[in-house]
Image (tube, grey):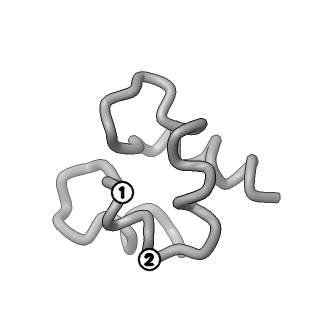
């Protein structure tokens, strides 16, 4: 699933609830959230995808 499909509310970031829609993303969410704001931007999302491989 790509970033824009996960970003259900269109705010430009993925929160934990939105992340739960993608298998494995919840497990890497905290590690990928590099600025610790509780959401993933596109760069952090790409990092999370790399961690999931």
The residue shown at (61%, 56%) is: 27
Query: In the drawing, does residue 23 fall left or right of residue 8?
Result: right
Q: Is residue 17 above or below residue 38?
A: below
Whole-percent x and y of residue 51? 74, 48
Whole-percent x and y of residue 19? 43, 64
Place residue 47 in its image quadrant: top right
Query: In the drawing, does residue 51 fall left or right of residue 38?
Result: right
Query: In the drawing, does residue 10 fall left or right of residue 21?
Result: left
- What is the quadrant of the N terminus in the image? bottom right
The residue shown at (59%, 36%) is: 31
The residue shown at (60%, 47%) is: 46
Q: Is residue 8 above or below residue 39?
A: below
Q: Residue furthest right?
A: 53
- In the picture of the structure, the residue carrying the numbered disc 2 is 21
Task: Tell which circle, 2 or 1, labels the residue nearer the N-terminal end.
Answer: 1
Whole-percent x and y of residue 43? 51, 37
Contact, mark 2 vs mark 1 (Cβ under 8 Å) = no
Whole-percent x and y of residue 39? 34, 43
The residue shown at (34%, 67%) is: 18
- What is the quadrant of the C terminus in the image? bottom right
Q: Which mark is residue 16?
A: 1
Question: Within 10 Å of the Cα at label 2, are there few (<14), some (14-19), or many (20+) other Cα atoms?
Answer: few
Mark 2 secondary-structure assignment:
loop
């Amino acid at each position: 699933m790509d970033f824009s499909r996960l970003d259900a509310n269109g705010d430009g970031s993925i929160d934990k609830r939105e992340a739960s829609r993608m298998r494995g993303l919840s497990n890497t969410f905290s590690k990928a959230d590099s600025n610790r704001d509780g959401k993933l931007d596109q760069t952090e999302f790409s990092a999370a995808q790399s961690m999931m491989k």
